Image (cartoon, coloured by chain):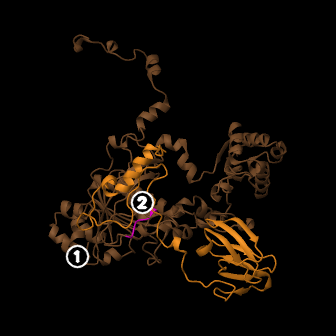
Chain colours: A orange, B brown
Amino acid sequence: MCDIIWCKKCGTVNYLDPYYFWNWQGKTHCAECKTVYYIHMINGFMYAGPEERPGEQADILPLYADKPMDGFASYLPGTEGRTRPFQCQHRHIYLGKPDMVKFSIRGKPLRGWRPQPPSTGRLGSYGFKWDVEKLSPEVWAEYQEKQKRGEVTEW
Amino acid sequence: MGDVRNVCLEDLPGPSSQAELEAEKVSYEEYCRQLFAPGREFEKPEALKGVRWMSCTMYIFTPHAVANLAELGAEVIKIETPRAGEPMRHTSPFNEAYLYPMHDSRPNTGTGFGYMNANPNKYNITLDYHRPEAQEVFRRLVTVSDGLTECYRPGTFDKWKQSYRYVQEINPRFIYVWGGGFGYGPKTFGASYDILGQAHAGLASVTGWHEDFGGHPAKHTNWIIDWYSGTQITVGILAALNWRRKTGLGTMIEFSQVQCATRALGYGVPMYGRFGIVRQRWGNWDTQLCVHGIVLCGKSDYPDDKNPQLKYDARYVAVSAFNDADFKELCAVIGRKDLYDKYKTHKERLSEYAQMDIYKTLEEWAADKSRSEVAKALTGAGLLAIPVMNDKEVYESEHFRARGTVRWQEDPTFGDVVVQGGYSTGLMSATPRRVKWIWRTLGADNMKIYHELLGYPVSQLEDWYAKGII
């Protein structure tokens, strides 16, 4: 899944790789003519842009670019000043550090956050019930407040 | 009432005539509500209670085969690699929160939502089959279980001397399931994932739009053949259990995932055999029925929503009006009676050029409407039309809520969760399926199974745990 900016000025296709651009808002440029474009992508979908922003600096460069109408002349990743080097890494938000959601969308408490306290059982064995009130007292307190505010619903 | 021996049936309370009996009957709707009683599954017995099954499974395909048994009441013991667990625990959806279980060895590593629906109600233990000490434990489990499902490459369990021909010697009633990619044969060494099941069986070749429309062979976004094959294995297991009731003997089930999907292709391969025709893709339209497809509408049901999947994607509606009368009505609703005059018979409508013409006309009509407006207009005229719903709408569906298909549940370990798998597989009045827990943490039942069931002393288990055997 990869969106592109096909620069109408120079006919260059700039590839917006999902590693950086999947959920992203900012400015990038055309690798060939260096026209700066503003884009806003949500879940890989071009929500806004590309809009030209003359005179501004690009935040992140495209990973790769080529010119399909010109014999597919290309700029490989990491071409100085034109494309970004490929580091095989997602942005930090995709590196597995999760959002610690404490309540479901209907306002009831979830359980099992990281890091976990050591298990009380032997051999990794684990009891059948995580008692929110005892094991996550701060979430329990917040839950009581949510109930008072009427933020806990059935659906 | 006097002496019951002298009472006539007619004197007993209750309807005294057929007409009264009929009048006292509740409506079919009410009857079903009482019979199936969504939310009260736990008051009823379990069909497979007493069956104990070992699950040496990974990812979705084989775990789902056993999850069906677990939801129907079997006691399923899932065996995973010590400290790491099976890979599906760590294959969470993109950009999705993990659920972090309490675990001694990897407190920062959780189990992703991808584990969902394939592992409910199972007891989770850990065991490293490679170690000589594990052999005896494995065999002890075999002697007290009814069957096993495994997904290792063909011959792996045989190499470890725990395949069907070995376990049969210690438990002749044992039902052994191997489920995997290709099975024995020329491609025996091929491993498999769902995508191979979709591709190798020819399913992907008839999915998606034809290349003439800019389409490509498409895989289903979800691992649909994993879920489908798993269910087919469960069918085999239930038949094997019945066979064992009659004969007292076990069975080996060898289940190739890539062969399974050919069944879902319907007439595709037989048609090739008879006529030499290779079936083509036809996207969101239908090769056998027209109109019977998905139509794009011009306006969104959520025009102001920030989420592009709602703002832009909530524009599709499935329409079915293929018989002559329905098609005539459809043409009347969209104000194009000339279209009916042009394609009066179903055969005429089925040709590819007719379909292009008809669907194009439909989409032109829908260009200034939202999909709910289209669905309302068509269903109002007695035609079949339903918006293509997304997950949000499935969650909000009153129909699913009333039937208990989608429901909130308090999971003992993970808290508030929406359960949409366990209750979506058909209702049973006497022995309904149920989800007791969505999954257990890695090795959560080591004490319960090894100590309480098999009777190993705790000191022995601690020794194994220290050595990484469990």
Residue holding disc 1 = B466
Q: Residue at x 38, y 50 (%)?
A: B410
Viewer-proximal residue among B210 and A128? A128
Label 1 packing within 10 angstroms: few (<14), some (14-19), many (20+)? few
**Secondary structure beneath disc 2?**
loop
Residue B286 seen by the camera: no
Chain designation of label 2:
B
As shown in the figure, which amino acid type bears the numbered disc 2? Ala
In-image side of B158 versus A150 (left or right): left
Mark 2 = which residue?
B118
In front: mark 1 or mark 2? Answer: 1
The magenta region covers B108-113
- Quadrant for the C terminus of chain B in the image: bottom left
Picture coordinates of residue A44, whole percent (x, y):
63, 67
Q: Which of the numbered marks, if any, corresponds to residue B166?
A: none
Nearer the observer, B55 or A52: A52
Determine whether B376 is above or below B268 in the image.
Answer: above
Residue at 36 percent across and 76 percent down: it is B155
- 3D distance between C-alphas at marks 1 and 2: 30 Å
The quarter of the picture where residue B123 lies is bottom left
Rendered location of residue B65, percent (x, y):
40, 60
Instruction: Determine the main secondary structure of the stretch shown in magenta.
Output: loop
| Secondary structure type for disc 1 | helix
The picture quadrant where one finds residue A79 is: bottom right
Q: For the N terminus of chain B, which image quadrant?
A: top left
Subunit bearing disc 1: B
Q: Is B72 on the left-hand or right-hand side of B221?
A: left
Which residue type carries mark 1?
Answer: Ala
Q: Residue furthest right?
A: B338
